[in-house]
Image (cartoon, rainbow, N blue to C red):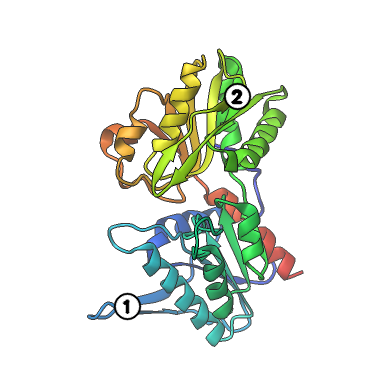
């Protein structure tokens, strides 16, 4: 796990820190890293599926932070988590919060950030408009699909946390076993892989190879097998924002191995692990998979779970909240 320098406990003006029930476990870890407690709130369910949430602490004039990761699970869909975040943020503003920041480790709807077919939606922009409409002042996210599209969609201030601080220390241990290559499993992730490679080079103090693979998707069908870059006799780190079914990672790993790679690891900020992921994660082409805990790996069976390493993102989120709060209250 990445090491973070010891930070002082929160000081100066107080703040309110909330984690909605769906992200309570991660929120508690963030609060522990900050050296404070989560503030109390209430969430109630009604018979017809409606709900309400309210703070149980006075928020008037306060800096308020809401932690909510927007992945779907067996209890709530991504839509449910989005609307609960919006309603709770609106409630905080209704009752006088001076500033509301949404801390969204996994931001749903970030993958549809541009029109690729006639009459396509641009859901990233629609989500941004909803955030703005309820009075959210700023948003913090971890490794979105397309940083440029995300930043352009939001008119309010955004903080994008890339995955490098989470994984470089673990990745550096692999450099002790021979040459490393950082690769993107598709052309769209080349910049992400480049930033990760540069951070890893600083960490280990030596150059690292780079590569990327071709990928085309249409109507749910993925194709393309071109590999650009030399991976022969190297350990390849496939770097992506998320793993859904895992098919992209397996295809990329097989291509790298066919080109002479010694072994291949998959690294992703978010492990959604949808249907088919158990097969992909245990596929022999992958030597291992490393993710953060922005999304719990609840869909994985025991065999797949044993092949996955999890790096906690709470210290990185806590550092960011601390910095934002101290800047706002100077």
Q: Sort mark 1 into few (<14), some (14-19) or many (20+) by Cα contacts within 10 Å.
A: few
Q: Secondary structure at mark 1?
A: strand
Q: Which residue is mark 1?
A: 44
81 and 95: which one is in front? 81
Query: Residue 117 at what x, y percent from top left?
Result: 50, 57
Q: Secondary structure at mark 2?
A: strand
Could one spot residue 11 in this view of the protein?
A: no
Q: Is residue 222 above or below residue 65?
A: above
Task: Determine whether, in the image, residue 23 is placed left or right of residue 317.
Answer: left
147 and 309: which one is in front? 147
Q: Mark 1 touching mark 2, by CB under 8 A?
A: no
Q: Is residue 263 above or below residue 139?
A: above
Q: Is residue 223 above or below residue 326?
A: above
Give the image quarter of residue 275: top left
Query: Residue 124 at what x, y percent from top left?
Result: 54, 63
Query: Residue 328 at what x, y percent from top left?
Result: 72, 69
Q: Quadrant of the C terminus?
A: bottom right
Q: Which residue is mark 2?
A: 181
User: Disc 1 versus disc 2: distance between alpha carbons?
Assistant: 50 Å
| Label at residue 297 | none
Give the image quarter of residue 297: top left
């Amino acid at each position: 796990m990445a090491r973070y320098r010891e930070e002082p406990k929160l000081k100066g003006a107080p703040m309110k820190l909330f984690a909605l029930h769906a992200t309570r476990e991660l929120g508690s870890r963030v609060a522990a890293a900050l050296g404070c407690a989560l503030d109390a709130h209430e969430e109630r369910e009604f018979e017809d599926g409606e709900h309400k949430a309210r703070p149980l602490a006075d928020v008037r004039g306060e800096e308020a932070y809401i932690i909510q990761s927007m992945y779907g699970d067996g209890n709530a869909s991504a839509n449910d988590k989005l609307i609960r975040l919006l309603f709770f943020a609106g409630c905080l503003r209704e009752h006088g919060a001076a500033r509301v920041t949404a801390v969204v480790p996994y931001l749903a709807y970030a993958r549809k950030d541009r029109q690729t077919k006639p009459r396509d939606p641009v859901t990233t922009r629609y989500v941004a408009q909803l955030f703005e409409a309820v009075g959210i002042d700023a948003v913090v996210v971890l490794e979105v699909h397309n940083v440029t599209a995300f930043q352009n969609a939001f008119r309010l201030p955004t903080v994008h946390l890339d995955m490098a601080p989470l994984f470089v220390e673990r990745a550096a241990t692999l450099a002790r076993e021979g040459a490393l290559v950082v690769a993107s499993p598709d052309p769209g992730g080349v910049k992400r892989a480049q930033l990760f490679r540069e951070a890893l080079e600083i960490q280990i103090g030596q150059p690292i190879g780079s590569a990327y693979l071709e990928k085309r998707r249409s109507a749910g069908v993925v194709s393309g097998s071109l590999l650009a870059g030399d991976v022969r006799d190297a350990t390849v780190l496939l770097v992506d924002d998320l793993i859904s079914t895992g098919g992209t990672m397996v295809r990329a790993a097989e291509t790298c191995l066919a080109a002479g790679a010694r072994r291949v690891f998959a690294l992703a900020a978010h492990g959604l692990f949808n249907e088919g992921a158990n097969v992909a994660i245990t596929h022999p082409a992958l030597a291992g998979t490393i993710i953060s805990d922005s999304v719990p790996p609840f869909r994985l069976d025991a065999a797949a779970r044993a092949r996955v390493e999890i790096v906690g993102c709470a210290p990185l989120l806590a550092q960011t909240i601390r910095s934002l709060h101290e800047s706002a209250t100077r």
